[in-house]
Image: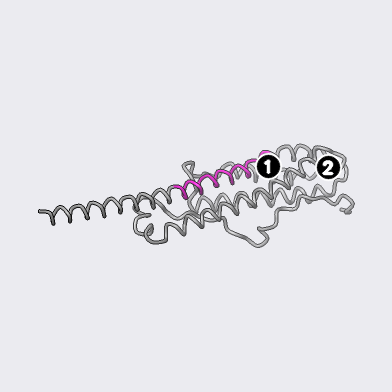
């Protein structure tokens, strides 16, 4: 009888230790997943900041005489396309959604860069304080975007590593801990779009 009780006690102790261990592992994955989701929200925040600056920039630039209307139309359309991208509201997007998000944001970055390059041909904009302020804010925002994307990738990497390591690899999938996507690097993606102006440059 004592032997049975001892065996049962040992099994119970092993079960408790195992439960506590798995609970700790599970909670660790939850914390990592939440960190990735929180950083994704921050990425969206800095992109939204840029989107909010663009109407003011367009309004300021469009005041220049004979400014290329096609350039303004292009940036307006690119900004509208960004707003149409459907993203998972419950957390980090899946790989396909992130790719669509990146594509739309990339198109907006390109349109914004072209607008700023064309703006260099209008020295009258130099005297506009609002334009100079917007230039500085856009430059800062592009730097923030780069930083926040990098942080997102770092947290996604740590999370993805955690779900593939023993013992989490044996149960992560059962509890819905899937892999998080990364922002992909493209040639020149580490350089923010040009937002400085050489007003002495001739058209």
CB-based contact (under 8 Å), mark 1 and mark 2:
no
Q: Residue furthest left?
A: 1
**10 Å neighbourhood of mark 2: few (<14), some, or many (≥20)?**
few
146 in relation to 45, above or below: below
Residues rendered magenta in the picture? 31-52
Q: Residue furthest front?
A: 2
Residue at which label 1 appears: 76
**Which residue is rendered at x = 75% and y = 40% of the image?**
57
* Residue 83: image location, x then y, percent: 59, 41
In-image side of 158 versus 116 (left or right): left
Q: Alpha-carbon distance for marks 1 and 2?
A: 18 Å
Task: Label 1, secondary structure: give it.
Answer: helix
Circle on res. 20? none
Circle on res. 66? 2
* Residue 24: image location, x then y, percent: 38, 50
Residue 121 on the magenta segment: no
* Residue 114: image location, x then y, percent: 74, 51
Chief secondary structure of the magenta portion? helix
**Which residue is rendered at x = 50% and y = 46% of the image?**
37
């Amino acid at each position: 009888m004592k032997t049975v009780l001892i065996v049962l006690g040992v099994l119970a102790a092993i079960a408790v230790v195992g439960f506590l261990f798995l609970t700790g592992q599970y909670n660790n994955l939850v914390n990592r997943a939440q960190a990735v989701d929180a950083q994704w929200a921050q990425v969206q925040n800095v992109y939204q900041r840029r989107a909010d600056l663009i109407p003011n920039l367009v309004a300021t630039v469009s005041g220049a005489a004979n400014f290329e209307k096609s350039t303004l139309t292009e940036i307006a359309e690119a900004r509208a396309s960004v707003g149409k991208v459907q993203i998972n509201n419950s957390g980090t997007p899946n790989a396909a959604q992130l790719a669509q998000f990146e594509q739309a944001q990339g198109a907006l970055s390109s349109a914004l860069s072209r607008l700023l390059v064309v703006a260099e041909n209008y020295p009258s904009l130099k005297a506009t304080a609002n334009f100079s302020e917007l230039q500085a804010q856009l430059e800062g925002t592009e730097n923030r975007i780069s930083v926040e994307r990098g942080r997102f990738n770092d947290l996604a990497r740590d999370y993805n590593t955690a779900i593939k390591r023993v013992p989490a690899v044996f149960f992560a999938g059962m509890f819905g801990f899937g892999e998080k996507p990364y922002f992909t690097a493209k040639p020149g993606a580490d350089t923010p779009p040009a937002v400085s102006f050489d007003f002495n440059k001739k058209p």
